[in-house]
Amino acid sequence: MTIPSADELALARASAHALWDRDLASRALGITLEEVRPGYARTAMTIVDTMVNGHATAHGGMLFTLADSTFALACNSRNVPNVALQCSISFVGAVRLGDRVVAEAQECSLKGRTGVYDVSLARDGETVALFRGVCYRVSGTVIGELPE
């Protein structure tokens, strides 16, 4: 693992916060941004009553959204805008009301205009879902000029 420079870390944080400030859906769900660095992001979400399905477990769509939001933060962490091209999720454990789920996205590959990211979701250190996202680079930047 390459250790990012202070400038790379600052750019990753600024990019993530610019994206985060515009992400009303994630914030409305109570998702919190915990850490970001180039190609990596960690978020968390506590399961509330409006996120529970008829089986008394977290609705899969809520967990997918948590993973997708984390994927978005990681793949946009270099101030290069990316959009999802393909995503999939496997649910491997149950999540219930009151559980806090932590999502960690890690870059696996970055070639040409596409990137591949794996996101693990865990409750109390136990993996509950595995997500893989493929992103596609589009034109522009995530943020304008960096704040001084």
Image (spheres, rainbow, N blue to C red):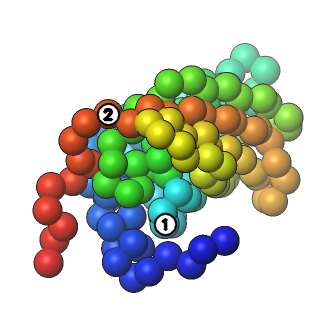
Q: Quadrant of the N terminus?
A: bottom right
- 121 to the left or right of 20: right
Amino acid at dot 1? Arg
Q: Name, please, the residue furthest toward the front.
A: 112
Q: Specify which label sits upstream in the sequence, 2 or 1.
A: 1
Residue 78 percent across, percent down from the top left: 38, 57
Secondary structure state at the residue bearing disc 2: loop
Q: Tell me which residue sits at (41%, 73%) in the image.
A: 9
Q: Which mark is residue 54?
A: none
Residue 57 percent across, percent down from the top left: 75, 30
- 91 to the left or right of 35: right
Q: Looking at the rendering, which quadrant does residue 51 occupy? A: top right
- 65 to the left or right of 56: left
Residue 14 percent across, percent down from the top left: 30, 64
- 28 to the left or right of 69: left
Quickly name the residue at label 1: 37
Q: Would you say residue 105 is visible in this rendering?
A: no
Q: Tell me which residue sits at (67%, 25%) in the image.
A: 88
Amino acid at dot 2? Val
